[in-house]
Image (cartoon, helix red, strand yellow):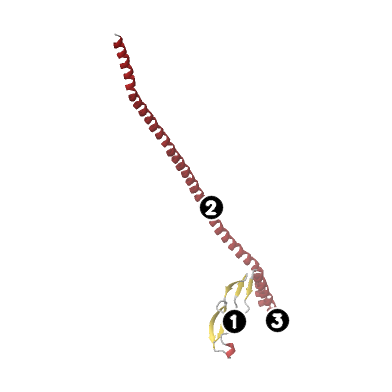
Amino acid sequence: MFFKKKKAMNDNINDKVEGQPADTDNMAQTVEADSTAAEGHEGAFPAEEHYAKIEKLEAELAELKDKHIRLIAEFDNARRRSATERIELEKTAARSVVESLLVVLDDMARAEKQLDKTDDVAQIKSGVTLVFNKMRTILASKGLKAMETGKEEFNADLHEAITEIPAPSEDMKGKIIDVVEPGYYLNDKLIRFAKVVVAG
């Protein structure tokens, strides 16, 4: 009886000892499962970070697109405004010149009436000279300046040769003999070439 109880106790102990590896395997599997779960959980964080970065980049892209559209609109508005201002400036400049020449037009009308009333050549000449001088003065105040053209060498940048005649002497070859129409500058910018006759 004693031996039977002892044997039963030993069997029970052996069963517990023999059961340990099975429990250890279960524990290993549990740890591995937890580790796998933890790894899967850790792997989710980078994905979330990537999504966050993508959303941030999309927001920045949308902001840049909006700025780009606004800049294009501002540029178009500035271009239209500049074109409108240029047209208005040209109209204003033309009006200013015309208004300043109205006094000359009035003088010309008075001179025309005077021609019908008198045959005094000296008086007519004086009146016409006054009109011409007033015209020149007004245009000069607007920046118009006549080109001074003499017997200098022909310059294609300033002169337009309308004809060529034989040179009266060797030293006159290639030089201007006569000015048919004077050249003009407006605010130091050439606006008309001088039409000249050149010695060949």
Height in image: 182 above or below 102? below
Packing grade of label 2 (10 A; few <14, some 14-19, many >=20) is: few
| Residue 168 in view of the camera | no
Spatial CA distance of label 2 from label 3 is 65 Å
The residue positioned farthest toward the top in the image shown: 1
Q: Amino acid at mark 2?
A: Glu
Q: Residue at x 37, y 31 (%)?
A: 32
- Give the image quarter of residue 88: bottom right
Question: Which residue in the protein does label 3 denote?
Answer: 122
Q: Amino acid at mark 3?
A: Ala
**Position of 49 compared to 84: left or right?**
left
Q: Residue at x 32, y 14 (%)?
A: 9
Depth check, front residue: 62 or 116: 62
Question: Which residue in the protein does label 1 denote?
Answer: 179
Q: Residue at x 68, y 79 (%)?
A: 125
**For numbered disc 1, what is the local secondary structure?**
strand
**Position of 63 compared to 90: left or right?**
left
Residues at badges 3 and 1 in contact (C-beta under 8 Å)?
Answer: no
Depth check, front residue: 44 or 152: 44
**Percent position of residue 124, x then y:** 68, 79
Question: Which residue in the protein does label 2 denote?
Answer: 74
Kindly report which numbered mark, 1 or 2, lies closer to the viewer in this rendering: 2
Height in image: 198 above or below 127? below
Q: Amino acid at mark 1?
A: Val
